[in-house]
Image (cartoon, rainbow, N blue to C red):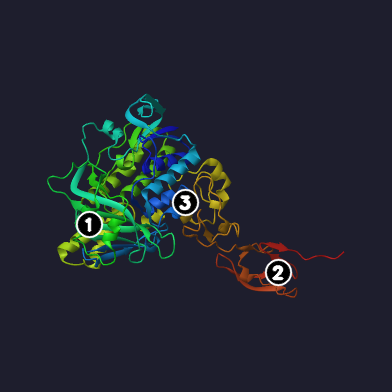
Amino acid sequence: MRVTVVGGGIAGLTCALSLHAAGFEPQVCESARAVEAVGVGINLLPHAVRELSELGLARELATIALPPHRLSYRDRTGEPVWEEPLGTAAGYRWPQHSVHRGRLHMLLLAAVRERLGPDAVRTGLRFRRFEQSTDGVRAHFLDRTNGLPAVEDADVLVGADGIDSAVRAQLHPGEGPPTGNGVHMWRGVAHHCHILDGRSIVVAGGTPGAKFVVYPIEDPATAGGDALMNWVLEVRHGPSAPPPGETGRRITTAEAHAAMASWNLPWIDLGALVEHSSAILEYPMLDRDPLARWSFGRVTLVGDAAHPMFPMGMNGGSQSIVDTRVLAWCLARESGPAAALRRYDRMRRPTVNAVVLANRELGPEEIIARAVDHGGPLPAGRAEEIATRYRRLAQATAAQVNSHTSWTIPSPATDRAGASDRGRHRYGRRRRGRSRSAGALTGSPGRRRCPADQGRAGHPDRRLRADHALLHHVPQQPRREPAHRAVRAGLRLNRADLRCQSDSDAVAGPVTDPGGTTRRLRRPRSGTFRGRRWVPPRRGL
């Protein structure tokens, strides 16, 4: 099956990797003439890191990102309001990652070109329209390099072209531009010494338009040096503000210093942060109303094209990655593209639409907004309730992420070759003696057993996933000791009952069989049990 993916951002490239892993032929068409490492910081929550790990990117991701251990909500004076652990510290089997968006983008691009080929991502193609029939879908583009039209024929078309999606505009004509809440985000990256414990995400302030966010995305190159910090300052503009959709306006150093003057955060030098920022850019806080439908025939949406949301709870990019994995799974499971896209729509849209609406009500950041109204920190139970409710709504609690079945589609060849190692038959029936919990974390196609899992072949007490240095061990149910068959009496006995001390032991003591009956078993005067096999005595000539 051929799939055209419109948009070569994080959602589009992850979509290509997911489709390729499921056995499809994706082609990514990107409007920009070149894909470059631009942007600022982004957080990938554990449910997104799990999906990237199952695509075989855990090790590469860990080399470019930092795993934060704590989320700290604080007031405008820097005093704690609420704190909670993140990632593995919160019980997830996968970490959370803070990473520069440009570096993540380049990692995904390199993986797509390595696995799918150098021509898997075509740049300079601006999407114009599509037309579909019962046999396929044709996408029309403008080639920006020569000004000529271009056409891509496929079985499925996926719109991954962001908040201003042209694919979405054709599916929902007359929707209009995105809507904002009057808040603009001034974003930058700068070198600064680590703050707090060096692995904290800090959200200070209260309501939108009066918040400051900062976290590290790269450790110092040398001991005692400065880390690379991502920071965001939210401001509200007056009536003379630029139009809501205008993005990327450069903020001068003087403007930034003036806006920072009212903040008093003793654990960070805000002036130095502004001075060391290579560029400070303004982005309006925008979203769109949730849609009643994403999929039409052979065409669907993923990521910000489907559900742009306010950046509360660090959930936008992570939900986009999950979209692509579920989409590939549905296409592999259903008999036809239209049925697969309808199933994907039913599985993902209600959950993500609920997150969009929750983010309009501040999401988990309701904790600091209510603290401002409360005049101090909320009771711990109330704050925990708000945070847990949001995670449950996004299907991102530790229990939900750790236990749900993998979206990976194993290839038949890989599944046959690895059936004994994973404890599964080709068609999903489990082998005896294997833990049922292991099925949720099966490896992706082509995954090899890591060295730590090869020390004792077939050992039942522990299995390691790929990238074992980065992920946690998956515990298995212990295997029961095999019962021995008593050759002479036809009884099943435990090892403790088989005690032939010498050839003079002619009669064994009382033995209880599995049915509860006590018998006396006469044993041979010589011979022994080796494992499950009784070895008769050697006879002379």
Tell me the mark number nearer the camera, choosing from 2 and 3. 3
What amino acid is at disc 3? Answer: Glu
What residue does disc 3 label? 60
Residue 499, placed above or below residue 209: below
**In this view of the protein, can residue 40 be seen by the observer?**
yes
206 left or right, relative to 57: left
Mark 1 or 2, nearer chain start:
1
Count neighbours of disc 2 (C-alpha within 10 A) and say few if under 14, some if 14 to 19, many if 20 or more: many
**In this view of the protein, can residue 362 be seen by the observer?**
no
Q: In the rendered structure, are the residues bearing label 1 and label 3 in contact, judged by CB atoms less than 8 Å apart?
A: no
Quadrant of the image occupied by residue 266 = bottom left
Tell me the mark number nearer the camera, choosing from 1 and 2. 1
What amino acid is at disc 2? Answer: Arg
What residue does disc 1 label? 257
Position of residue 271 measured from the top left corner of the image (x, y, whole percent) = 26, 60
Q: Tell me the distance, in whole angstroms, between the alpha carbons under discs 1 and 3.
A: 37 Å
Mark 1 or 3, nearer chain start:
3
Position of residue 183 measured from the top left corner of the image (x, y, whole percent) = 19, 49
Position of residue 467 measured from the top left corner of the image (x, y, whole percent) = 50, 54
Residue at screen point 56% across, 48% down? 418
